[in-house]
Image (cartoon, rainbow, N blue to C red):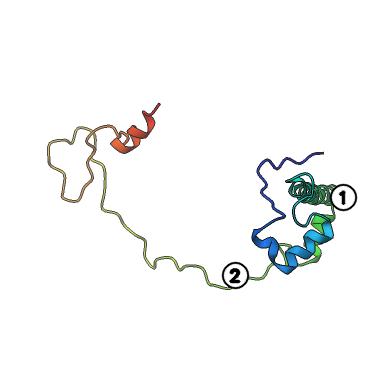
Amino acid sequence: MSVNMPCIEVGTVGGGTVLAPQQGVLEMLGVKGAHPSHPGQNAQQLARVIASAVMAGELSLMAALAAGHLIRAHMAHNRSQTNTPAASAPPTPAPRSPVKLNAQLPASGDEGGSTPPGTVTATGPLTPSSSTSSLMSRT
């Protein structure tokens, strides 16, 4: 098993490391401040600690899934379908009467201008807009 975190940014000097809680944790891990002889080594060690914690969490999750503990825990702690409380807000009400649209396409051969006002007429095949086609033509 491995974990890959190619862009983890950590620091042991400056920024929030001057705050007491952060200093305490960095000191507990043995990476507070700059390394005396190898600059950046403390930050690399902190990144390894974080990646190790991520890997331990993933391993724990996989073990819980494999053993069935995760499902049992969710069922026991009120995350089952039967124990899910009802929604707190009522659903959006539906319209009281069906909505009617007055738009209709003319029958084939009805291009003579005899369509009533408000009727949608087909004028040809649908094509992408010029802004969409310009996006597709970039190289």
Labels 1 and 2: the sequence-earlier one: 1
Q: In the displayed structure, does residue 29 sit left or right of residue 96?
A: right
SS type, badge 2: loop
Disc 2 crowd, CA 10 A, few/some/many (<14, 14-19, 20+):
few
Q: Position of residue 77 (x, y in %)?
A: 78, 66
Residue 117 appears left or right of 72: left
Q: Which residue is mark 1?
A: 67
Identify which residue is drawn at 69% across, 64% down: 18
Relative image position of residue 16 (x, y in whole percent):
66, 62
Which of the pair 105/8 is nearer the observer? 8
Residue in the image at 51% along x and 68% along y? 91
Q: Amino acid at mark 2?
A: Ala
> Residue 59: which numbered mark, if any?
none
Q: Residues within 10 Å of mark 1 (few under 14, many from 20)?
A: few
Front position in the image: 11 or 115: 11
Task: In the rendered view, tell whether residue 67 sits above or below residue 78.
Answer: above
Where residue 95 appears, as percent x and y from the top left, is 39, 66
Identify the image quadrant of residue 29: bottom right
Q: Nearer the viewer, residue 116 or 136?
A: 136
The residue that appears at 29% across and 54% down in the rendered structure is 101
Measured Cα–Cα span from mark 1 to mark 2:
32 Å
Observer-side mark, 1 or 2, equals: 1
Q: Are marks 1 and 2 in contact (CB under 8 Å)?
A: no
Q: Identify which residue is drawn at 81% across, 60% down.
A: 27
Judged from this view, the residue extending furthest toward the left is: 113
Q: Where's the N terminus, which quadrant?
A: top right
Q: Name the residue tied to disc 2.
A: 87
Quadrant that contains the C terminus:
top left
Dot 1 amino acid type: Ala
Q: Disc 1 on helix, strand or loop?
A: helix
